[in-house]
Amino acid sequence: MAAPSQVLAPRDTARFRPPRFGLGGSHLGNDLPGATADEAADDRADERAVATVDAAYQAGIRFFDTSPAYGASERRLGTALRRRPRGEFLVSTKVTGADPEESVRASSERLGLAVDLVFAQDESAYPALDRLRRDGVIKAVGAASDDWRELDRLVRDVELDCVLLTGRYGLLDQSAKPLLDRCVARAVSVIVAGVLTPQVLQVQTIQARRISAVCERYGVSLPQAALAFPTRHAAVTSVMIAASSPAEIRADAALVRQPVPEKLWKDPELLRLLSSN
């Protein structure tokens, strides 16, 4: 994945367009499996998280998402990214607590970096985030949810730059398409997360097996197709990939780099299977 030449588009000339793939930081705050709560275990967990971010960066990923709710994720992400040229990457986080401005300030302190994009889930946070955007403290404001209908309402009611949708738009479930269509009309960018579900990775359902069989005829694995599918919608600018180890993000990045033949997406059987989701 090539690094983008410009990760933030000017709001008065183009909609906000994050890089095509990002690393979700939900696993970066985790302890090591089976580790006891001691300083050495914390250090090893820190090292693994930093190595995961480094592996993502080396694979060309330039978009990194985190949250105060992800444990030590912000601190560990900042440790890895502070060694990198600041103009090369985009960092997003979430608002927590009753004071959005204080939440953003505290996140920036834990990261040791300015935050570019801030997601909220409570509509009451948006006036404060809009002030921070207008003052140049942050570059963009978004909404994050796994409820596409709630995001659809916010896109109607709030001046958003983007939304972060977890689930509900992928190979096995396109129920959020009305949201995506509205985002196209409102020039709001969509970031999709949660595409590598257990159903995709382990081909658990009848629908997954049928779609996988079609993909295999074109030399494409189901996870590879799942990563490529969302950005075929005009609203989707980015796909967020969660990873807990360097090996995991390298494997996912390798899938991203493998081209998916255009003729797969035109296969009549695949089109029929997708239309039934």
Image: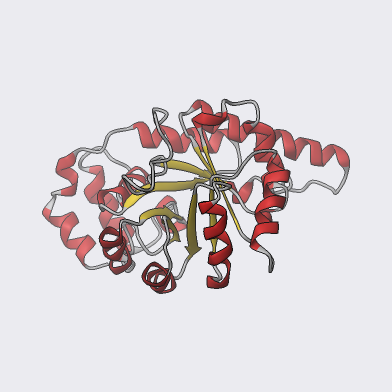
Q: Residue furthest right?
A: 38
x then y, percent, for residue 213:
25, 50
| Quadrant where the image shows the C terminus | bottom left
* Relative depth, front residue between 148 and 33: 148
37 to 219, vertically: above or below? below
x then y, percent, for residue 41:
81, 40
Q: Is residue 8 left or right of residue 182?
A: right
Query: How is the rendered protein coloured?
Result: secondary structure
Label tally: 0
Q: Residue at x 62, y 32 (%)?
A: 81
Q: Is residue 88 left or right of residue 236?
A: right
x then y, percent, for residue 155:
38, 67
| Quadrant where the image shows the N terminus | top left
Q: Is residue 213 left or right of residue 37?
A: left
Task: Say which quarter of the image contains residue 54.
Answer: top right
Q: Residue furthest front?
A: 135
* Relative depth, front residue between 174 and 124: 124
Q: Residue at x 41, y 56 (%)?
A: 162
x then y, percent, for residue 84:
59, 26
